[in-house]
Amino acid sequence: MEKTKGVNKSRTKKKLISLDVEEFWHQISKLEDYSELLIYKNLANLAKLCLCLPHSNAEAERIFSIVTDVKTKKRNRLGDDTLNSISVIRSSFGAKTINCTNFEVTQEHLKLHNAKTLYKK
């Protein structure tokens, strides 16, 4: 990106306006003044950090919903590992529109489903 000197300012501005948000802030972070010091380094870093923030908490709400569906009064003694496993399976199956009626059990599944692998301790 060009330095922000005299004639180049309008050309630099036109280039920046045409960029997407991530590239815009990347280019802003590289702008230098006359002494070749970065002008907006901290501002650009702050903007990049803000862009990393999730726009909503829908995913967290979805997980809490799954966990409250799984851990009921009758199933209140589920361990963390079991609760995590069931939640991951429910979330994954939901994303792939798989359920107990259309899930295909393979020989590998049956091979892994034994006391040795299920109850490691």
Image: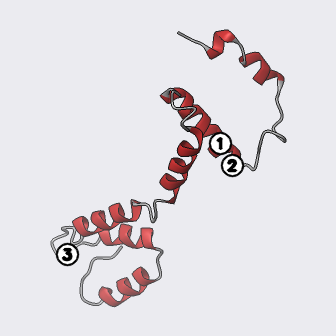
Q: Is residue 110 above or below residue 21?
A: above
Label 2–label 3 contact, CB within 8 A: no
**Left or right for 68, reference 12:** right
- At 65% across and 42% down in the image, what residue appears? 90
- At 50% across and 26% down in the image, what residue appears? 79
Q: Which residue is mark 3?
A: 33
**Left or right for 121, reference 111:** left
The amino acid sitting under disc 1 is Arg
Secondary structure at numbered mark 3 = loop
Q: Which residue is mark 2?
A: 94
Residue 56: image x %, image y %?
46, 64
**Left or right for 110, reference 76:** right
Residue 109: image x %, image y %?
76, 24
In front of the other: label 2 or label 3?
2
Residue 1: image x %, image y %?
36, 73
Which residue is at the front of the view, 83 or 75? 75
State which tag comes first along the sequence, 2 or 3.
3
Secondary structure at numbered mark 2 = helix
Q: Which residue is mark 1?
A: 90
Which residue is at the front of the view, 64 or 8? 64
Q: Which residue, as the protein is rendered here, is positioned at the far front?
A: 73
Label 1–label 2 contact, CB within 8 A: yes
Mark 1 is surrounded, within 10 Å at the Cα level, by few (under 14), some (14 to 19) or many (20 or more) other residues, namely some
Mark 3 is surrounded, within 10 Å at the Cα level, by few (under 14), some (14 to 19) or many (20 or more) other residues, namely few
- At 36% across and 83% down in the image, what residue appears? 12
State which tag comes first along the sequence, 3 or 1.
3
